[in-house]
Image (tube, rainbow, N blue to C red):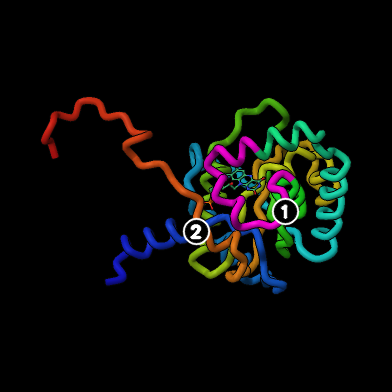
């Protein structure tokens, strides 16, 4: 039976970071629909601090080119690249090594900076100057948006790398210093044949990250 529980669980477990996209545009109406749902995310004192810049077409391509240029200008030394590859190989991203056919350091940096070829980049910012407390509402908003996208057959990936170049992001998208950059999300239709989209990043069992206090043995 498709109870709320089943549907919600399926959407949460079905979402995964998408690293290959179809060459297919996402319409403005589809993204407006996502924002309509994502705005129901919780935020401190209902501050709703999110500001979303939705980039496609020419501005998105300019941003992609500028970020890639920055990535290529900061190549790792052979030793740094090897260290990075070793960390990936021995960590929770090791599953990826079998799904890609280039060195993982290059794949992740260039892929992230080019938002894996997604047609749309969403930058979630929030009002405030440097040093203002990070509004926890931003991750809540982004997570809600990503789940809404999953439920609509759209693919997303949250990307940390591009925000390592805040001036490039700001100038390409016209985001002023009166806003802080909170999150960068790529959006598009997933390429469902791509091996990297088919594999699942593993998770720890709850017993490894939970601590129970005040629960008697056998208590329900
Ligand atoms: C704050 C944040 C930053 C991330 N930055 C990147 C990134 O720059 N490049 C990338 O390929 N994935 C990035 N990811 C995706 C994570 O690698 C991914 O969520 C994690 O491996 C779990 O896989 P899943 O999303 O497929 O379940 C980021 C995720 C989060 C939440």
Closest to the observer: 78 or 203? 78
First reached walking from the N terminus: tag 1 or tag 2: 2
Q: What segment carries the magenta color?
A: 86-105
Q: Is residue 164 left or right of residue 72?
A: left
How far across and down, in percent of the image, does residue 98 sit?
59, 55
Name the residue: 38% across, 60% down.
Answer: 8
Dot label at residue 192: none
Closest to the observer: 211 or 140? 211
Name the residue: 27% across, 72% down.
Answer: 1
Query: Is 69 above or below relative to 209?
Result: below
Dot 1 falls on a residue whose secondary structure is loop
Q: Which residue is denoted by mark 2 in the rendering?
A: 15
Q: Which residue is denoted by mark 1 in the rendering?
A: 102
Mark 1 or 2: the one toward you: 1
Residue 104 lies in magenta, yes or no? yes
* Circle 1/circle 2 CB separation < 8 Å: no
Q: Is residue 151 left or right of residue 103?
A: left
Q: Quadrant of residue 82?
A: top right
* Residue density around tag 2, few if under 14, some if 14–19, many if 20 or more, within 10 Å: many
Dot 2 falls on a residue whose secondary structure is loop
Residue 32 lies in magenta, yes or no? no
Q: Quadrant of residue 134?
A: top right
Q: What predominant SS class does the magenta segment belong to?
A: helix
Name the residue: 85% across, 43% down.
Answer: 70
How far across and down, in percent of the image, does residue 150 sit?
51, 63
* Residue density around tag 1, few if under 14, some if 14–19, many if 20 or more, within 10 Å: few
How far across and down, in percent of the image, does residue 213 sit?
25, 26
């Amino acid at each position: 039976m498709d109870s709320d529980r089943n549907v919600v669980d399926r959407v949460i477990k079905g979402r995964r970071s998408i690293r290959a996209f179809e060459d297919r545009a996402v319409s403005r109406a589809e993204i407006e629909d996502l924002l309509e749902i994502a705005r129901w995310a919780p935020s401190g004192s209902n501050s709703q601090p999110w500001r979303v810049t939705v980039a496609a077409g020419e501005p998105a391509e300019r941003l992609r080119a500028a970020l890639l240029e920055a990535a290529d200008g900061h190549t790792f030394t052979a030793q740094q690249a090897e260290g990075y590859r070793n960390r990936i190989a021995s960590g929770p991203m090791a599953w990826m090594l079998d799904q890609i056919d280039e060195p993982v350091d290059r794949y992740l940096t260039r892929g992230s900076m080019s938002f894996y070829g997604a047609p749309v980049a969403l930058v979630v910012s929030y009002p405030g100057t440097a040093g203002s407390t990070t509004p926890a509402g931003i991750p809540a908003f982004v997570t809600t948006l990503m789940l809404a996208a999953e439920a609509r057959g759209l693919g997303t990936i949250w990307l940390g790398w591009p925000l390592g170049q805040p001036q490039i992001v700001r100038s390409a998208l016209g985001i002023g210093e009166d806003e802080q950059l909170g999150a960068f999300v790529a959006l598009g239709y997933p390429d469902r044949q791509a091996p990297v989209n088919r594999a699942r990043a593993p998770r720890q069992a709850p017993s490894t990250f939970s601590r129970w206090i005040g629960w008697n043995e056998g208590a329900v």
